[in-house]
Image (cartoon, coloured by chain):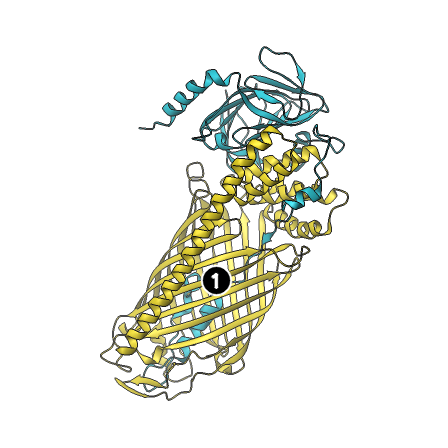
Amino acid sequence: MNFRPIFLAALVTTFAGAALAQTVGTVGAANQDATSEPPGGARRGLKVGAGVVQRERIRTDAKGSAQIAFRDSSALNIGRNSDVTIDRFVFDPASGAGQMTTSMTRGALRFVGGKVSHGAGMTIKTPTATIGVRGGVASVGYDSAGQLHVIHHYGVVNVSNGGGTVRLLRPGFETIVTNFNAPPSPPARVDPNFLAQITARVTSNPAQRGGVKKQPSNSDAARFEIGFDRLGGDTPNFDLPAARDNLVRGQTQTRGPIIQEEKRDLGCGMYCY
Amino acid sequence: MYRKNLFGARRRRGVAGYASALALMLAAGAAQAQSVIADQSTLLPRILANPADHDANFAYAHASVEARDYEAAIAALERTLFFNPNLTRAKYELGALYYKLKSFDMAQRYFEDALKTPGLEPDLRARIEIMLPATKKELEPSRLSGVLQLGVGYSSNVPLAPVFGLIRSNGADIPNPGPYYQRGGVNLTAVGEVRHVYDFENQRGDTWESRFAGIGTSQFAFGELSSVLVEATTGPRLALAPEVLPGASIRPYVAASYATMALGRLGSSIGGGVTARFPIGDSFQVEPGVEWRHLDIAATSRFLEVASTLNTGSQWTGSLAARWRATDRLTFDGKVLYGRNSSYTSTLTSRRFGLEGSARIEFDPPSELIGWRWSATPFVRYAETRFSAADLFVDPLVVRVDRQIRVGSQFDMPITKMFGVAALVQYVRNNSNLPNYRASAWSGLIGPTLRF
């Protein structure tokens, strides 16, 4: 019997009441104009470091963008002209289990997963489709024609609506949803221009600084070894000298009074030793 | 008998020593992983309390990379880009992180974005010039890559001749009649591997993979032992139920090889096999495989040319390989294999058992302007070959058993985008219950490499 759903339901029930007013995350960055509206509260400008609670609604204008950092290490980058609500976030740090649901009615966002999405997954509700992100990274956004693009970067992404379900498994592939009753398009490579556009929307523009006075510098990053990573090159195939040695050995070994050739290890290939 | 026991004891001590070293490295890898996870969990609350704590963000990103929690590192670095959109180090690191997640289109975006940012540091530019072409290549449906090396080699026992001056003949030990005695020598070696991957561009990630590898050695001391060995394999790699087993794949393939010695045909093989790859978690994978080949050994003009063709036969090999990426810079590989060579005569028919282990240790090169990591890969390989029947020409009462141990290390030092230096040093010892087959040699190879 699979106890996972029961455990999760119990966890959700236990924490749900307390969690309503509990801070579930923090405004990690905010470019104005980005505002938030907690349930029953007044609309306010987003400030870096401010707490975010469940059912808090975040809206941005043509210059606004924000990042919400959650307690499970996940992050939601909210793009310009967006309207996003943190419907539910439940997380038990001890077990790493939890639940997370957000809604987006317009704009663009990038979700970068943490512990919750590695378990039950994270759900993004839009008017045209429901998106499930499990253990991964995904970008979601509307294009100028009003079509919803769901772009897979890592993990597994399910896109469902009244027309059916599409599962995205490969980074760089996307599905496009035109309306709730039309099935999501078959997975296909994302248009690089649209990817560039959506990436630019979910961060600061070159003149913005995300709501902080002091900007981080490259020398700050260098102190923590950021920007020093390298590729490890493919190593030359050193099975081949071993195979060559075995050829030689077979050629020169003696079988009694007459020197005779033995050439046994010819086909050792991947199994040379 | 005494000698056999002596060899056995030495072998056991040697294997135990390498096993201990390997266990220590495994423990060190695990301890390091625990430490960086602890760093991560203490830094996250600090960031949530003050997301503008830049030191905490960078330290957290660094700890997350070390823990291979690449998503957490991406979240932190994309936050720092909100604060400073011209932060080229964060852009470069994000490109590298998305590359590791195989999200090559995002990696390309960040690398290109970093290149366009004013004031890009020379060391970052040098690394991007390596990373960006590699990233673009991954996005092409048809990908050709390879690494070639031209090197100078040395072996302390070129013909791998018996270590003692005696050989056994018809059950009696006699002086080695030659012509092959232990003698060191220099050689010129060209070794390379070219791979082609055709991507079917479907969501499953199915590809067609081909590999061509070869080695050519020109011996100065024993010109007649100059050899060429080439091998090719080709076959599809098909995803196995990607929704249920992400990353798991199966690869049936056909394989062929051809060898010459002193420019004369030595023989060829043709066959095929199938391997499957199963990732377990993010850092472990196992790869079982089975292969069959028909070996066709040529009749040459030397000595008993008809007898040499008796080696013609078939070869079965089953293997189980495993890989563990203990940290971002430390990868362990292991393989156990079992095989059978069938020849026309039982004296040339044998069973093989092999055990291999290696640790690839990657480290930063001495200059920041070098865009690659360097690596050292110490390895140990043990192989046991048991023949089916005694060879009457050698000793009618002793069935040959060979135990070979090969230890060494390879070093890879790429320098520019295409050129570098690689080296191999190894010691091979073949212990046998028959003196004819006991051999040992130190050997090395060093020379420039070409990558594309």
Nearer to the camera, B354 or B29: B29
B199 lies left or right of B437: right
The image quadrant that residue A129 belongs to is top right
Nearer to the camera, A210 or A111: A210
Q: Which amino acid, mark 1?
A: Pro
| Residue at 66 percent of width and 51 percent of height | B127
Could you tell me residue B342's position as x and y percent? 31, 67
Could you tell me residue B171's position as x and y percent? 25, 84
Using the image, name the chain to which the residue with label 1 belongs. Answer: B
Is residue B98 positioned above or below B408 on the image? above
The image quadrant that residue B348 belongs to is bottom left
B293 lies left or right of A136: left
Name the outermost residue toward the top: A40
Is residue B13 positioned above or below B240 on the image? below
- Position of the C terminus of chain A, as image quadrant, is bottom left
Nearer to the camera, A133 or B408: B408
Q: Chain in cyan? A: A
- Position of the N terminus of chain A, as image quadrant, is top left
Rendered shade, chain B: yellow
Could you tell me residue B346's position as x and y percent? 27, 72
Question: Label 1: how many residues lie within 10 Å, few (<14), some (14-19) or many (20+)?
Answer: some
Residue matched to label 1: B378
